[in-house]
Image (cartoon, rainbow, N blue to C red):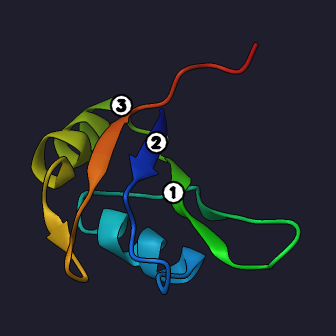
Amino acid sequence: MNIFVANLNYKIQSEQLKEIFEEFGEVESAKIIMDRNTGRSKGFGFVEMPDDQQALAAIEKLNEAEVDGRTIVVKKANPKD
């Protein structure tokens, strides 16, 4: 399952994002989206988890949780068109 994570602290790196979700199970990938012009984080990213049950548990526990001083938004990502 592809998971959308928003309102992240701009200092969080992809590896840290992966570690947050690994508490709930296997993480295939975690990526923070970066601004092409500035090279800074845009404050959101995506996490890919192969097990849907683990992914749903992560979404349930982490949505509206506080991470590095920010209340994050975690939900199932919409498929790309």
Instruction: Choose top left, top right, bottom left or bottom right for residue 39.
Output: bottom right
Q: Earlier in the sequence, mark 2 or mark 3?
A: 2
Q: Residues within 10 Å of mark 1 (few under 14, many from 20)?
A: many
Q: Residue at x 88, y 71 (%)?
A: 37
Q: Are marks 3 and 1 in contact (CB under 8 Å)?
A: no
Mark 2 → mark 3, Cα distance in angstroms: 14 Å
Q: Which mark is residue 44?
A: 1
> Which of the 4 image quadrants contains residue 60?
top left
Residue 56 screen position, x and y as percent:
25, 34
- Secondary structure type for disc 3: helix
Image marks 2 and 1: residues in contact by CB distance under 8 Å: yes
The image quadrant that residue 81 belongs to is: top right
Helix, strand or loop under label 2: strand
Q: Earlier in the sequence, mark 3 or mark 1?
A: 1
* Residue 73 image point, x, y percent: 28, 47
Q: Is residue 6 above or below residue 57?
A: below
Q: How packed is label 2: few (under 14 Cα within 10 Å), some, or many (20 or more)? A: some
- To which residue does mark 2 refer? 4
Please give the residue where the numbered disc 3 appears in the rendered image.
52
Does residue 47 appear to the left or right of 31 in the view shown? left
